[in-house]
Amino acid sequence: MVGGGLFEKEFKQVRSLFFLLVIFNSFAVPFSVWSQYSGHMELVKKYPDYTPEPFVFQFGADPLLFISSLFVFFIAITQIETQRAKGIMDFTLSLPYKRSKIFFVKWVLAFGMIVLSTLISLILTGSYIEWHDIAVSQPLFSYYFLYFSSLVMFYTLTLSAGALTGT
C-alpha cells in the first residue's frame, strides 16, 4: 500500500486549488438556491396583491458545471504539467513507488475532494429545499449524480491525457 508521505506530498502541491474547489463546489448551489428563493420571497412581500407562480428552482440553469470543470481541469494540469516544468515530477518518479501508484494517489486525492464538496453541497441544498419546501425542476439526487460523475470524468480524462502525453 502507498505510504502516507506520498499522499501528504501530493496534497501539499495542490492544496490551494483543492480548497478552492471544495469551497466553491460546496456553497455554489446552496447559495444559488438561497438567493433565488430570497428574491422570490422579497417580491411576494413587496407586492402582496401579486400572486406569482409557485417558486421552482431550476437545476442546471447556472454555469456551475462549467466553472467546476475548470477547477478540476486546472488541478489535473497542475498535478502533471507544473510538476514536470519545475522538475518535481522527476523527484516524485524517483521515489520508491510504482508510477501507477503515484498517479493513483493523485487521482484518489482529487476524487476525495470532489466527493467531499459534492456531499457538502447536497446536504446543504437538500436541507434548505426541505426546510423551505421548495419545488425543484428535477430530482435532487439525479442532478448531483450527473454533476459528480461529470466532474470525475472530466478530471480523469484530463489527468490521463496529461500523464500519457506529458503535457
Image (tube, helix red, strand yellow):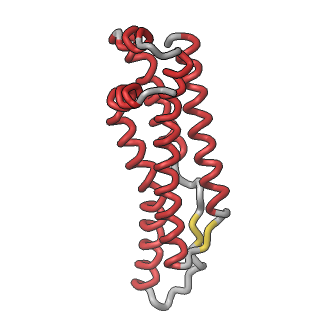
> Residue at 51% of width from left, 34% of height from top?
108
Q: Position of residue 92 (x, y in %)?
A: 40, 15
Is residue 98 visible in the rendered structure shown here?
Answer: yes
> Residue at 53% of width from left, 41% of height from top?
66
* 87 vs 6, nearest the viewer: 6
Is residue 85 visible in the rendered structure shown here?
Answer: no
Number of numbered discs on residues: 0
Residue 5 lies in quadrant: top left
* 80 vs 24, nearest the viewer: 80
Q: Residue furthest bottom?
A: 49
- Relative vertical location of residue 92 with respect to residue 129 in this rendering, above or below: above
* 111 vs 133, nearest the viewer: 111
- Relative vertical location of residue 64 with respect to residue 105 in this rendering, above or below: below
> Residue at 61% of width from left, 68% of height from top?
136
As drawn, is 106 to the left or to the right of 164?
A: left
> Residue at 59% of width from left, 58% of height from top?
59
- Relative vertical location of residue 130 with respect to residue 111 in this rendering, above or below: below
As drawn, is 12 to the left or to the right of 81?
A: left
- Relative vertical location of residue 68 with respect to residue 96 in this rendering, above or below: below
Q: Position of residue 11 (x, y in %)?
A: 37, 32
Residue 28 lies in quadrant: bottom left
Q: Position of residue 20 (x, y in %)?
A: 36, 42
Q: Position of residue 148 (x, y in %)?
A: 59, 46
* 1 vs 93, nearest the viewer: 1
